[in-house]
Amino acid sequence: MIHQDVALPVTGAASARGLLSRLARESDATVAACEAAAKDRAQALHDDAERAAIARRREVLSARERQHAQELRAARELVQQRVVAETLKARAAVIEQVMATAVSQADELLPHVELADCLRADVAQAVRYLPDGAVNVRCRPSLAALAQNAAAAVDQSRISVVIDRTTPFGVVVESSDGRVTVDATIARRIAGDRQRLSVRVAQLLEQWLA
């Protein structure tokens, strides 16, 4: 067997080295590009995550703000309802006091020049609703004389005056058996006209508080 060393041409060796060098450069460039793309992708993912986190925090804050606003509105409405309720309660108490005072101070009407005529008209009208027969006119002692005069003017033969300290200011006209009664006292008048009087008293209160 014959052994013979064969030397590669110089130009061929140089070409191989150049090819390897170029392949190395291209590989480095590819790796660098991949690294850059990976970094960009990682940064993009990080930015997306950061934006998502910010958006989530904003949503949470917005939800809390809405909840807080709702709770605040509910609290204000509750306070407003309580204020209205307390105002109405206080107004009702004042109205009751005014009406009670009017009833308790009714005796101050005794000197009124038209009181006798009013009592006579009340008795005359009440008698019309009663059956035939004896009639009683109950009144407080302070009105006894005026009631007697009214009874005499209407029909003295069938009307008797009964003194009753518990009767409010005015007269109560009733049949002798007590089955039919006509209440012409100031307490009854105030109760019957309560709605209008309440509105008027409320208007006066509002003017006074304004």
Image (cartoon, rainbow, N blue to C red):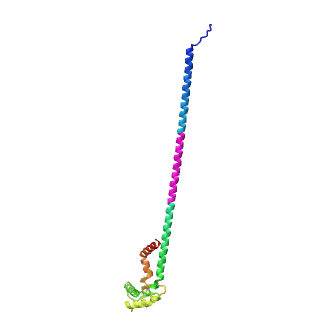
Left or right position of 155 against 54 = left
Q: Please determine whether, in this image, residue 57 is positioned above or below residue 108.
A: above
Name the spot of residue 191 as percent of width and height, x first.
44, 78
Left or right position of 57 against 171 = right
Does residue 136 show up? yes
Residue at the image point whose x is 52% and y is 47% from the top: 56
Camera-side residue: 134 or 97? 97
- Residue 204: quarter of image: bottom left
Does residue 158 show up? no
- Residue 146: quarter of image: bottom left
Name the spot of residue 100 as percent of width and height, x first.
48, 79
Name the spot of residue 30 as percent of width and height, x first.
54, 28
Q: Residue furthest top?
A: 2
Residue at the image point whose x is 50% and y is 72% from the top: 90
Does the magenta stretch mainly form a helix, a strand or a loop? helix
Which residues are the magenta region?
45-73
Q: Please determine whether, in this image, residue 36 is positioned above or below residue 189.
A: above
Residue at the image point whose x is 53% and y is 51% from the top: 61
